[in-house]
C-alpha cells in the first residue's frame, strides 16, 4: 500500500530537505532558497513536502497575502507561490490536488478569507488546471498570460493584481536591468548565465536584488521575483537560459 505524507518544514530542518528538484545543500540555489525560507517562516510561510513511500515527490509554498512575493493585493488570503510534483512517475495521480487541499485546510483553520494563486501557461510556473479542479475561479488577469485564481472560504472582496505595470516599468530607465530574488532556487544560475552573456555582448547591466515581499509586490511583472528589462521593455518575466537571453538580445539590437 502506498504511503502518502504531507510534512511541514521549518527553519530548523529546511537545509536538510530535498525540494524543487534540488538535493545538495551546498548547491547555490538550494542554499539561497533555504536561507530565504528561514526568514519567511517568521512571516507565516508554509513550505510543505509531499513524500510517497519515503521519497520526496513534490512541494507547495504559501504565505499570508500581507507578506506575499507576488504583485497582488490579497490581505486576509493565503497566497500560494509555488506547487510542484517534481518526479514524472508521480504526475497525473491527483497528488497536486492533495497539496492544494492541504493549503485550503490550513487557511480554513486560520479563519482566512480564502486562498489565491498566480498561474501562467508556461512550463516554469503552475498552470490553472489543478486549481480549477479544486474549486478556484479566475478573478483577474495580467500581461502577458498571468491569471489570478481564488477559492473563497467566506464572502469577501476578491484579490487583485497590482496596477500600473507600464508606470512601474518606466522607473527602471534605459539599459538592461535584472530584477532577482532568492524565492526560486533556479534564479541564481539563471542570473549568472545572463551576466556571462552580458559580458560577451558588451552590455553593462544593473542588478536589483529583491529582499522583501513589499519590493516583490511592486516589480513590473506579475511573477514578482524575477524580471529582465531592456530600454523600457520586458525581456523576460521568468527565469530563462543564457542561450535564450542571447537570442532575444540579438533580435532587439538589430
Image: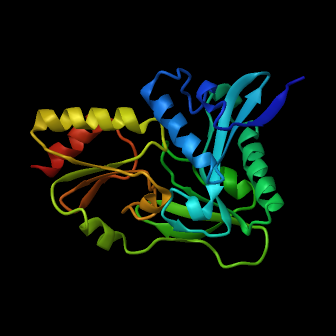
Side of 69 relative to 91 (left or right): left
Look at the image and name its color scheme: rainbow
- Residue at image coords 20%, 34%: 197
Is 159 above or below relative to 29?
below
Q: Position of residue 248 (x, y in %)?
A: 23, 45
Residue 234, image quadrant: bottom left
| Residue 129 left/right relative to 248 | right
Q: Closer to the camera, 238 or 41? A: 41
What residue sits 24% from the left and 60% below the top? 233
Q: Which residue of the protein is positioned furthest toward the right in this rendering? A: 1
Q: How many marks?
A: 0
Residue 237, position in %: x, y? Answer: 37, 52
For the N terminus, give its image quadrant. top right
**Residue nearer the viewer, 53 or 173:** 173
Q: In x, y percent, where is residue 140?
A: 55, 71
> Residue 196 vs residue 120: left or right?
left
The residue sitting at 51% across, 37% down in the picture is 35
Q: Position of residue 100 (x, y in %)?
A: 73, 49
User: Along the line of sight, which residue is nearer the eye, 228 or 16?
Assistant: 16
Residue at x 14% of width, y 35% of height: 199
Amino acid at each position: 500500500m502506498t504511503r502518502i505524507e504531507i510534512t511541514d518544514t521549518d527553519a530548523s530542518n529546511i537545509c536538510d530537505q530535498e525540494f524543487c528538484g534540488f538535493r545538495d545543500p551546498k548547491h547555490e540555489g538550494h542554499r539561497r532558497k533555504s536561507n530565504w525560507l528561514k526568514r519567511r517562516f517568521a512571516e507565516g510561510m508554509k513550505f510543505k513536502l509531499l513524500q510517497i513511500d519515503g521519497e520526496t515527490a513534490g512541494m507547495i509554498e504559501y504565505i499570508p497575502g500581507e507578506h506575499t512575493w507576488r504583485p497582488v493585493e490579497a490581505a486576509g488570503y493565503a497566497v500560494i507561490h509555488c506547487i510542484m510534483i517534481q518526479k514524472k512517475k508521480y504526475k497525473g495521480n491527483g497528488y497536486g490536488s492533495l497539496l492544494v487541499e492541504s493549503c485550503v485546510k490550513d487557511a480554513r483553520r486560520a479563519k482566512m478569507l480564502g486562498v489565491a494563486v498566480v498561474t501562467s501557461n508556461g512550463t516554469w510556473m503552475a498552470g490553472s488546471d489543478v486549481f480549477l479542479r479544486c474549486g478556484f475561479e479566475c478573478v483577474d488577469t495580467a500581461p502577458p498570460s498571468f491569471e489570478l485564481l481564488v477559492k473563497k472560504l467566506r464572502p469577501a472582496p476578491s484579490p487583485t493584481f497590482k496596477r500600473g505595470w507600464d508606470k512601474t516599468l518606466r522607473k527602471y530607465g534605459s539599459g538592461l536591468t535584472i530584477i532577482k530574488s532568492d524565492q526560486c532556487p533556479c534564479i541564481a544560475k539563471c542570473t549568472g548565465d545572463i551576466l556571462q552573456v552580458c559580458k560577451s555582448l558588451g552590455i553593462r547591466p544593473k542588478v536589483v536584488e529583491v529582499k522583501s515581499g513589499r519590493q516583490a509586490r511592486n516589480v513590473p511583472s506579475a511573477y514578482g521575483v524575477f524580471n529582465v528589462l531592456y530600454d523600457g521593455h520586458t525581456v523576460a518575466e521568468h527565469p530563462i537560459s543564457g542561450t535564450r537571453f542571447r537570442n532575444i538580445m540579438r533580435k532587439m539590437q538589430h
